[in-house]
Amino acid sequence: MGAHAAPFVRAPPPPTTTTTTLLNLLWLNLLLLVLFFSSTTVGDAESDANALIKFKSSLSNADALRSWNINNNNNDPKTMSPCSGNYGNWIGVLCSEGYIWGLQLENMALAGDIDVDSLLLLPHLRTISFMNNNFEGGLPDFKKLGSLKSLFLSHNHFSGQIPDDAFTGMGSLKKLYLSHNEFTGTIPSSVAHPNKLLELRLDGNRFTGAIPDLQQKDLKILNVSNNELEGPIPPTLAKLNPTSFSGNKDLCGKPLDLECKSPAVLSDPQKSSPMKIILIVICCLVALAAIIMVLIIYRRSSMTPQLGSSSSLKATGLPVPAAVVVAEQQQYGSSPDMSVSGNSKRGDQHGKLSFVRDDRQRFDLQDLLRASAEVLGSGNFGSSYKAVLMDGHAVVVKRFKHMNNCGREEFHEHMRRLGRLGHPNLLPLVAYYYRKEEKLLVFDYVHHGSLASHLHGNHSAEQPGLDWATRLKIVKGVARGLFYLHEELPSLIVPHGHLKSSNVLLNESMEPLLMDYTLVPVVNLERAQQIMVAYKSPEYAQQGRTTRKTDVWSLGILILEILTGKFPANYLIAQSGTDAAELTSWVDSIAKEDTARVFDKEMGTKNNNNNIDGHDQVGEMLKLLKIGVACCEEDAAKRWDLKEVLQKIEELN
Ligand SMILES: Nc1ncnc2c1ncn2[C@@H]1O[C@H](COP(=O)(O)OP(=O)(O)OP(=O)(O)O)[C@@H](O)[C@H]1O
C-alpha cells in the first residue's frame, strides 16, 4: 500500500490535548472562513438586488423591469438574485462571476429619475446603457461613478446645458454616447479629461460654440454632426471623417473643405453683419423651398397606392413589397404570408424595428416594405430579401422561422448583445423585429456575394477565380472574426455555430464578413441540430455535445474548402442531419491526396523561383493545408484551440 493511502487504513492515534485544541481551532477557522465567504456572496447578491430595486423605484415607467423582483412569486432563489455566475437573471443586468458589471436597459420606454446614488452601491458596475428610452431633463451626475468605462445615453430626451465638469474624474471612460438628445449650450470641456476615451458621440443635439480641444490619442470614433457648432475644428481631429462634423452651423478647418476666416473678419461686427443678414435671408428662402418640396412629395406619395397592399395588408399587418410577392410566388408556387402584425407590447409596436446600433439612419418596417425588394435566396432558416431604401441604401432582411421557443425578453437581450459586437470581419446586425412566430433581422447588403459563390460559382470578368493572396486574406479575416467572437462571448459554448462558405460574405476589397453567427442560443434546438454546422461536428456525432473547439472544426473544413475549391460533401444534402462520418472521410481524402493535385488550380502555384515576393507559395499553401487538417482533428481534446490556430494562420505569407 502506498504511503499516502495509509491514513485511510490505519486508525489515527488518539489525539492529545494539544492536538485536540489545534484541531478545534482549525475547524473553527474553517467554519468562520466558510461562513465569511457564504455571507459575503449572499450579502453581495442581496445588496446588489436592493440597489437595483432602489434604482427601479425612481423610474416612472418600469413595466419592462418586472423580473427585478426580490419577492419573486415562485420564490425561486435563483431568480430572486440578479446574477447566477455570468448569467443575468434579471432583464438587462450583465453579470460576471456573480457580480453586476453592466446595465443594458435599452428600448424599454423607461422614464423618470435616474438615481445615480443607488448605482453607487454596485461596486463592479462598469457599463451603463439607457439608449432608446424616454428619459428627460438634465444629464444625471454620472461622474460619481468614477470607474465607469462606457456610458450610452443616446436616443432619449435629455436636455439643457451639461455642466462643464460633468466628466471630470472619469479617467476610465472609453465610450460616451449622448447622440440624439436635446442637449444645448457648449460641449463640456471635461470630455477632454478621460484620457482613455475611444468613442465619443454627440451628434443630433443642439450644442453650440466650439469643439473643445480633444487630445485623446486613441479616439477612434467622434461624431459631433448635426449640432449648432462653430469655429475651427481642433487640429488633433483633422484626420477624422468629414461626415463626423457635417450639419453644423459654422465649423471650419480640416477635415472640412472650409477654410477658417481670419479672426479680424470674424470679430468685425460692422463687416460681418450685412453679410450675415444676406446669409440668413438666403437660408430662410432655401428652407422655405425645401419645406414646399417636402410637402409636395408627401402629398404625392400619400396619393399613390402602396405596393402589394392589396395582396397582403391585414387589419393589423403591414404589406409586402410587390417584387417580393412575385418572386416568392415563383419560388414557392404560392404567396407566403409576409405581413407582420404589430400586436406586440413593446418596442416592436406598430411595426417598429428595434435598432441595435447608434450609427445607422433609422427606418421602419413601412420603409422596408415600401422599398424595391428582391428575394436573395431561401436558406435553412427562412428567406432573405434585399431591400433598397429611399435614400439608396441597400439592406438585407432575413426571416427566421425557427426561433419561436425563444422568449421575448431572451430574444431582445440576445439581439442587444449582438448589437454590441463590432469587428471588421463581422457583418453587423443593424436592427430586428420580434414576433412570436417569426423574427426579422436586418443587415447591410454586401455587394460582392458570398465566398461560396466565388469558390463554386461560374467565373467571369466581374467575378474571376480567387488567387492565393485573396484566399489567404479571406482565411485570415475569417479566423480574426471568429477569434473576436470567442473573446467577446466567453459564456457561449459555440460562439459562431454556423460557419460555412455561404455564410462568409466578401466586401469590395475582398475582406470577409462573417454572417449567421451566434444564433445557437435563439434557434429552436431541434432545428439547430438538424441544420447548423456545429451539430455536424465529430464531437456532436460521437458524444452528443459541442465544445468551445467546435468552431475550430468548422474553420478547418472551411480552410480545406478554400484551398481545394471542393465543396464539402454533406452540405450538398441540406437539412438531412447527415452524420459527421461523411465530412471526416472528405477531410481524410484531402489529407491523403497527392500535394500536386490537392490545391485548386484556379489559385495558381508559384514557387521561390518565380515569386516576386520571394515566398514559396506552395510551401505556404501546404502549411495552411496542415493547419486545416489539424483543425479537423476528430478528437476535440487533441484539436488546437482557436488562439493557436489564429497564431499559425497569421504567420503565413
Ligand atoms: N447581407 C447580405 N448581403 C448580400 N447577400 C446576402 C446577405 N445575406 C445573405 N445573402 C445571400 O442571400 C442568400 C440566402 O442567404 P441565407 O443566409 O438565407 O441562406 P444560406 O446562407 O444559403 O443558408 P443558411 O440559412 O443555412 O445560412 C445567400 O446567397 C447569401 O449569400
Image: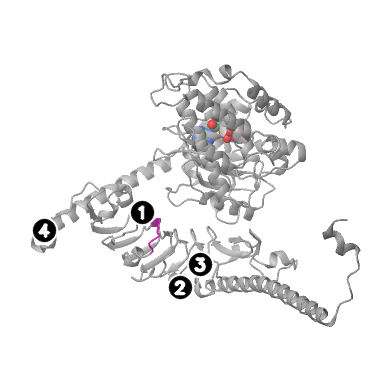
Please give the residue where the numbered disc 3 appears in the rendered image.
111
Q: The residue under label 3 is which amino acid type?
A: Ala
Q: Position of residue 538 (x, y in %)?
A: 71, 35
Residue displayed at 58% across by 27% down = 561
| Other residues around mark 4 within 10 Å, as few (<14) / some (14–19) / many (≥20) | few
Please give the residue where the numbered disc 2 appears in the rendered image.
144
Query: Which disc is residue 265 wearing?
Result: 4
Query: Which disc is residue 222 wearing?
Result: 1
| Sooner in the amino-acid sequence: mark 4 or mark 2 | 2
User: Is mark 1 in CB contact (under 8 Å) with mark 2?
Assistant: no
| Element type at mark 1 | strand
| Element type at mark 4 | helix
* Closer to the camera in the image, 203 or 559: 559
* Closer to the camera in the image, 510 or 602: 602
Residue displayed at 19% across by 51% down = 282
Q: Kindly report the distance in space between the C-alpha atoms of the residues bearing marks 4 and 2.
A: 43 Å
Q: Kindly report the distance in space between the C-alpha atoms of the residues bearing marks 3 and 1.
A: 27 Å
| Sooner in the amino-acid sequence: mark 1 or mark 2 | 2
State yes or no: Cβ of the residue under disc 1 lies below 8 Å from any atom of ligand 1. no
| Sooner in the amino-acid sequence: mark 3 or mark 1 | 3
Q: Nearer the viewer, mark 3 or mark 4?
A: 4
Asked if the magenta segment contains residue 199, the reply would be yes
User: Is mark 3 in CB contact (under 8 Å) with mark 2?
Assistant: no
